[in-house]
Amino acid sequence: MQGAIKLVSRTELSEFLSTVERRAYKQALYAVRNEHAAMDIVQDAMIKIAEKYGDKPAEELPLLFQRILQNTIRDYYRRQKVHNAWTTLFSSFTPQQEEADYDPLDYLTDDENQSAPAAPYESLQQRQIVALIESALIKLPPRQREAFLLRYWEGFDTAETAIAMGCTEGSVKTHCSRAAHAIAVTLKEKGIELP
């Protein structure tokens, strides 16, 4: 049999999902800015890939999962839009409550970063830069953030990112360029120059 395709086993699927879970959670958290919703989005994406694509070859899983994750985030926004329309319509019947300030950076940690310098000042400086970058990521338009994270965080090339996002390679390059420029501007405003 020539060129047989090896399908993913349950163990391989489980290992794949465990390796992408934390990064997927951060991506969802950047997008929706709600810890519980982000966890639900990741769980939904994991269930969808296991149920619908568990019979695919292992090398196809990263792109499929990213596509499912991004679509699940978009679905969340669609549901929120409908929910907000109904809430606004009936808001005059319920007393207004103040929402507590939510800061997604309170939930983001970088505990597994093995490159953290030993010196306390350098460690603090690195954490401050990471916080600034994460803050800038949250402010990016969704497609720019998606392209930037897929290219530079997930390590996908331009073609893979285009497949995951469902757009052209030119669009990926444009989104990444704009995202990188916006992040650089944010850092420069804080006195940090990138090489």
Image (cartoon, helix red, strand yellow):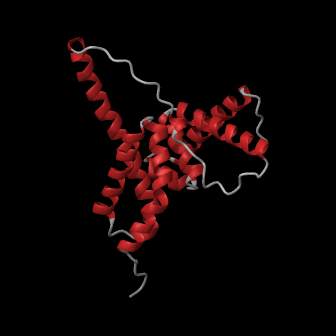
Residue 8 shows in this picture: no
Q: Residue furthest top?
A: 92
Please report the residue visible at 35 percent of the width from the left and 34 percent of the height from the top.
Answer: 77
Rendered location of residue 195, percent (x, y): 79, 42
The answer to whether residue 62 is left or right of residue 71 is: right
The answer to whether residue 159 is left or right of residue 67 is: right
Position of 23 relative to 106 (above/below)? below
Rendered location of residue 11, percent (x, y): 39, 73
- Judging depth in this view, the residue of 78 and 133 nearest the camera is 133
Rendered location of residue 134, percent (x, y): 59, 38
- Judging depth in this view, the residue of 6 and 168 nearest the camera is 6
Position of 76 relative to 151 (above/below)? above
The answer to whether residue 169 is left or right of residue 180 is: left
Please report the residue visible at 50 percent of the width from the left and 43 percent of the height from the top.
Answer: 146
Residue 29 shows in this picture: yes
Q: How many marks overall?
A: 0
Please report the residue visible at 51 percent of the width from the left and 31 percent of the height from the top.
Answer: 103
Q: Residue furthest front?
A: 120
- Judging depth in this view, the residue of 86 and 141 nearest the camera is 86
Rendered location of residue 57, percent (x, y): 40, 71
Q: Residue furthest bottom?
A: 1
Position of 56 relative to 96 (above/below)? below
* Quadrant including the N terminus: bottom left
Please report the residue visible at 70 percent of the width from the left and 32 percent of the height from the top.
Answer: 187
